[in-house]
Image (cartoon, rainbow, N blue to C red):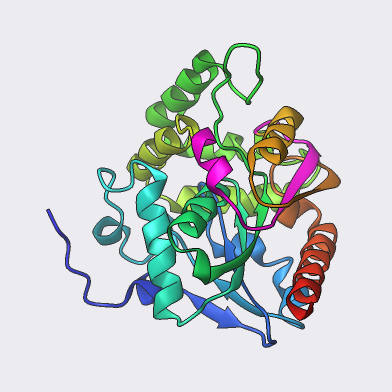
Amino acid sequence: MVIKLDKSLSTLMNARIIGSGKETMVLAHGFGGDQSVWDKVLPSLTQTYQVVVFDWSFSGAIKEPNTLYDPAKYNNYDAFSDDLITLLEELNLHSIVFVGHSMSTMIGCIASIKNPQLFKKLILVGASPRYLNSEGYERGFDMKDLEQLFSSIDSNYYEWASYFPSVVIDKNDSESIKLFGESLKRMKPEIGLSLAKTVFLSDYCDILEKVVLPCTVVQTTKDIVVPLAVVEYMKKMIKGEVTVEMIDTIGHFPQLTSPLQLFEIIDRSMNSCISESLK
């Protein structure tokens, strides 16, 4: 069934343009989140840059998620990348710096391959092209781990949503755990299960060699979701110039646990981007 949208996609996705400056960056949240995960880093970024934030179709922040999110359509990242391209085109943006977190890193990579003129640089936070371990290479999870994850989501979503944030965020950071937990609980349980399978069973290793834009890969020192081996793999496989930036924090959400350090990395990456364009 084709669903007719009466409003623009940017409106339905709650897109906002904040701040001012010659350079524009787009912040894209990951699984279970919404644009609120950027709140700690936004005030610093918007002093210098024009920043776009939005909510993906699966987010509980979307007013009418059942009319926007179709599990059959969003069973891979291609549909998300098409939404990102449409969003940028509707906002009349091009040559932007894309800051993607978690699943959004690969979505941004795919969109940059499809429509490269829209992008200038990719900043990939907590990036992984595949979460399932393979022989001789640790990517994050064994299949039995993922089956347990899906079972927990399916049996009692809200109980799982109360527990999961403390797994992926430093247990001592109760504020960040609460923020992400509230975002998870706003997402509909049936969407949560469908999306979890889309994300954790995905494999986009083959697209990395097609990414030709300069990339900054941002990784925390202790991330249960993305092992350090994945960072080395991405650095090796991405065709564009890759800079790796490490943040000494626990968990998968440096924008929550270490916003100042993340801002400094993004700012440094933006400045290097500006310097290159002036040459």
Residue 251 colored magenta? no
Residue 56 rendering spot, x and y as whole percentages: 44, 59
Q: Quadrant of residue 71?
A: top left
Residue 173 rendering spot, x and y as whole percentages: 78, 47
Residue 7 rendering spot, x and y as whole percentages: 27, 77
- Residue visible at 78% across and 64% down in the picture: 269
In the orientation shown, which residue stands out farthest toward the front?
279
- Using the image as rendered, state which of residue 62 and residue 195 is in the foreground: 195
Residue 144 seen anywhere in this rendered image of the structure: yes
Residue 120 rendering spot, x and y as whole percentages: 62, 68
Residue 219 colored magenta? yes
In the orientation shown, which residue stands out farthest toward the left?
1
- Residue visible at 47% across and 38% down in the picture: 199
**Vertical arrangement, residue 23 with respect to residue 137, above or below:** below
- Quarter of the picture holding the C terminus: bottom right
Tell me if 61 is positioned left or right of 165 in this view.
left
Q: Quadrant of residue 4?
A: bottom left
Count of labels in the image = 0
Tell me if 228 is positioned left or right of 17 in this view.
right
- Residue visible at 83% across and 66% down in the picture: 268
- Residue stretch in magenta: 204-225
**Vertical arrangement, residue 213 with respect to residue 130, above or below:** below
Residue 13 seen anywhere in this rendered image of the structure: no
In the orientation shown, which residue stands out farthest toward the right?
248
Tell me if 75 is positioned left or right of 97 in this view.
left
- Residue visible at 73% across and 65% down in the picture: 40
